[in-house]
Image (tube, coloured by chain):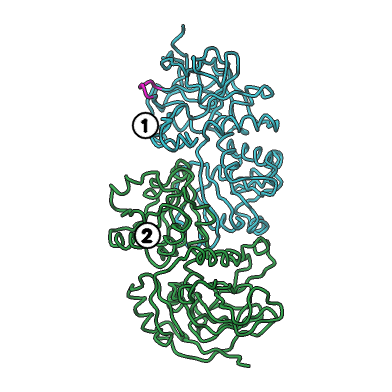
Chain colours: A green, B cyan
Amino acid sequence: MTETLTGWAATTKDKPLVQMELPLAQWNEYSVDMNITHCGMCGSDIHTIDEGWGPTAFPCVVGHEIVGVVTRIGDKVTNIKVGDRGGVGPECYSCQKCPTCLEGYQNGCERGYTGTYNGKLPNGDKTYGGYADKWRGDSRWVFKVPDSMSSEDAACFFCAGVTTYAPLKKFNVNEKSIVGVLGIGGLGHFGVLFAKAMGATVVGMSHNDNKKEISKQLGCDDFINTHNESDLARYRKKLTHILCTGTSNDFQWGTFFNLLHVNGNFMNVAAPEWNFPELSPLQLLMSQISISGTAAGPPDIMQEMINFAAEKGLKPWITTYKMSDVNNAISDFRAGKPRFRFVLEN
Amino acid sequence: MTETLTGWAATTKDKPLVQMELPLAQWNEYSVDMNITHCGMCGSDIHTIDEGWGPTAFPCVVGHEIVGVVTRIGDKVTNIKVGDRGGVGPECYSCQKCPTCLEGYQNGCERGYTGTYNGKLPNGDKTYGGYADKWRGDSRWVFKVPDSMSSEDAACFFCAGVTTYAPLKKFNVNEKSIVGVLGIGGLGHFGVLFAKAMGATVVGMSHNDNKKEISKQLGCDDFINTHNESDLARYRKKLTHILCTGTSNDFQWGTFFNLLHVNGNFMNVAAPEWNFPELSPLQLLMSQISISGTAAGPPDIMQEMINFAAEKGLKPWITTYKMSDVNNAISDFRAGKPRFRFVLEN
C-alpha cells in the first residue's frame, strides 16, 4: 500500500514549488484516502508559502480547497464511502473534547484546530494539503460533494465558500436583507453568490469603481464606491449586513456605521496586514450595530454549505490550471489575475 | 394653568446649579404633565453640565431618570392616566416616520431622537429634564411605574436600568449564560442585578481588586481582576457575554477575546473619553465573537424592562438627596461616592 504522496512543496519562501515525495499521515480507523482531482488556490496558501503569518514548517504542501475521489476508508468511517467524491477545507482535525468542539464549533477548538497544511496531528504527523496527488486525513473533516456539482466547481467552496456562507447564515441573511459585500475578489464573489441565493438584495462595495461592472455581472443589485458621497448617501442606514471580505488601509469605521441599519451586522472574514482603526465606544453604542468575525466553518456547516450551493446551482467563476503548472498559477495569482478563483487540476 | 417649571439649571459649565423658572413645552394631544417626585443622577447629566460631549444650550436642566405623578394627559394619551406614576428616560421624542422608528427602535431614530434635556422638539421648544418640580412631554415616552416598586427605586431604571437590560435582552442572556460585567459602578450594578434576574451566572470584572467584595455583596458569583493572570486563566473562553459598563484606558481587546466563548458577545454601553484600541481583523475572526453596543432602549423595551424589574423585585443600591441639595449631590457624585446611584427627591 502506498504510504506516500507526491506534492508540489514549498521548500523555502523564495523559491518555486518543487515536486517531492512525502509521507502520508499514519492510518487509523477514521482515515480516508483520496486521489486528489482538484485543489483551489487560496490567499492563505500564498501567505503560508511567504511565511506572512509566521514561520512555515518546510517542506510544505499547501492547498485547502481539496476535492478528490475516495479510495479507502477506515473501519469507523460512516459519512463517506469508496468512490464518493470528498471535499476538504482548511481544518482537518480538532481535540473534539473541549466545550467549543462539543458544541459543534470545532473551527474554534480551544486547543487550536489542526490546519490542513502546515499543521500537526496529535501523533506528531505533519499535514500536507491539496497541491498533490493524494490526501489522507480524518473522515470527520471530509464532506461529500453533491452529485450535481462538478469537482472543479466544488473545490473552492471548501474554503472561500464556507468562509462567506458561515457568517451570512449565522447572522440570518434572508430575503429581507440588504447585504453589502465589501471587496469583490475571491471571497467577495462567493459572498455575492451566497447572499443572492439566500434571497437578499446584494450591493457590491469597493473603494473605487474598478469592480462596479463585474459586480453587476456577478449578480449584485447595486454598487457602492466607498469614496463616492452619493453612493454612501443612497445607502445611509440601509444595509442590514456588511460582509467584509477585503479592506483598503484607509478603512474608517464611520463609513460603515453610517451605512448599517439599526441592529445591522458588520461581519469580517478578511485578514489584511493592517488593523481596523480605533473604535469610538460612543459611536459603537449609538449606531447599535455589531462587529463580528467568523473563521471558515465547523464540519456541520461545511456539509450544509456545499449541499446548499448544489441545491441552488451556484457556479463560481474559476480558471483552471494543470497541477503541474502550479508555479505559473501562483505567478498569475500574485499578479492579481483571478476572476475570481484559480483551481489546480490533476 | 401653570406653563412653567421650576428647575435646578446649569447656566454655564463652571457654576453650581441655580433654581430658575423655565417654560414647559407647548401642550398637545399626546402631552403628559407630571409632578416630579424623584430623579436619578446619571453620568450623562454631569457630562452635559460640563459640556464634555459638546456645547450645552444653557440654561439647561438635566436629569433623565425621572419619576413623577401624572397630573394631566392629552386627549390621545392611552398608556397612562392622571394619578399614575410615570417614568421617563433619556429620550422623549423621535420622528416616528423613519424605518428605524417604524421598526420600534426609536432610540436609533435616523433623524436623531430628542433628548430629555438639552434637546429640541420639532416645534423648537427646548427640553428640560428631571432636576425640577414638573415635567411635560410626549406620553409615548412615559412609562407606567409598576405598583410594587417605590418611586425612589424606580427612577434610575429609566436610564441606567434600561441601558444594561437592553443588551442583555438583545443578546439573549439566560440561565445558561455566564456574563462578565466589566465595571462595577452605577451601570454595572444594574447589569449584575438584571443578569442575575435573567438566571445567568454573573462575574464582576474590574481592573483591580477594589470592587471584589462589593461585587459579591451585589450578587456576583465570582470576580475577575483583569490584571490578575490566574483570574483570566480561570475564565479562559468561559464567558458567553461581557457587558462593558466602564473601561480603563489600558483596555486591550486580547484580554476580552480570550475570556469570551465562541459566539460570545462583547456588549458596550460605556462612553469613556478614550477609544477602544485598534482591532486585529484576524484576531476578530479567529475568536468568532461579536462586538456591539446599544443606546438606552426604545419605548417597548423601556416598559418591558421596568415590568421585569418589578416582577423580579429588583432593588437598586441608591442614596437619596433632597432635590434642594442637588449641588452637594453633584459634588459627591464627582468625588466618586455613589454606591451605586444617587436619587434626588422632591
Q: Nearer the viewer, residue B325 or A313?
A: A313
Residue at position x 57%, y 39% in the image: B166
Taking the magenta stretch, the answer to whether it contains residue B34 is no
Q: Amino acid at mark 1?
A: Pro
SS assignment at label 1: loop
Q: Which mark is residue B230?
A: none
Q: Please state, as top left, top right, bottom left or bottom right, where the N terminus of chain A lies in the image.
A: bottom right
Q: Is residue B174 left or right of residue B256?
A: right
Q: Is residue B85 above or below residue A58?
A: above
Q: Is residue A52 left or right of residue A33?
A: left
Q: Specify the quadrant of the image occupied by residue B322.
A: top right
Q: Is residue B343 above or below residue A273?
A: above
How many neighbours does mark 1 have within 10 angstroms: few (below 14), some (14-19), or many (20 or more)? Answer: few
Q: From the image, tell me which residue sits under label 1.
A: B55
Q: Specify the quadrant of the image occupied by residue B51.
A: top left
Residue at position x 51%, y 47% in the image: B292
Residue at position x 62%, y 33% in the image: B340
Q: From the image, tell me which residue sits under label 2.
A: A219
Label 2, label 1: how many angstroms apart (C-alpha)? 47 Å
SS assignment at label 2: loop
Farthest-out residue, top? B1
Q: Is residue B266 above or below residue A80?
A: above
Q: Which residues are magenta?
A: B122-126
Chain letter for mark 1, please: B
Q: Give percent across and percent down for residue A52.
A: 44, 73
Chain letter for mark 2, please: A
Q: Is residue B260 left or right of residue B327?
A: right
Q: Give percent across and percent down for residue A190.
A: 44, 64
Q: Give percent across and percent down for residue A14.
A: 39, 83
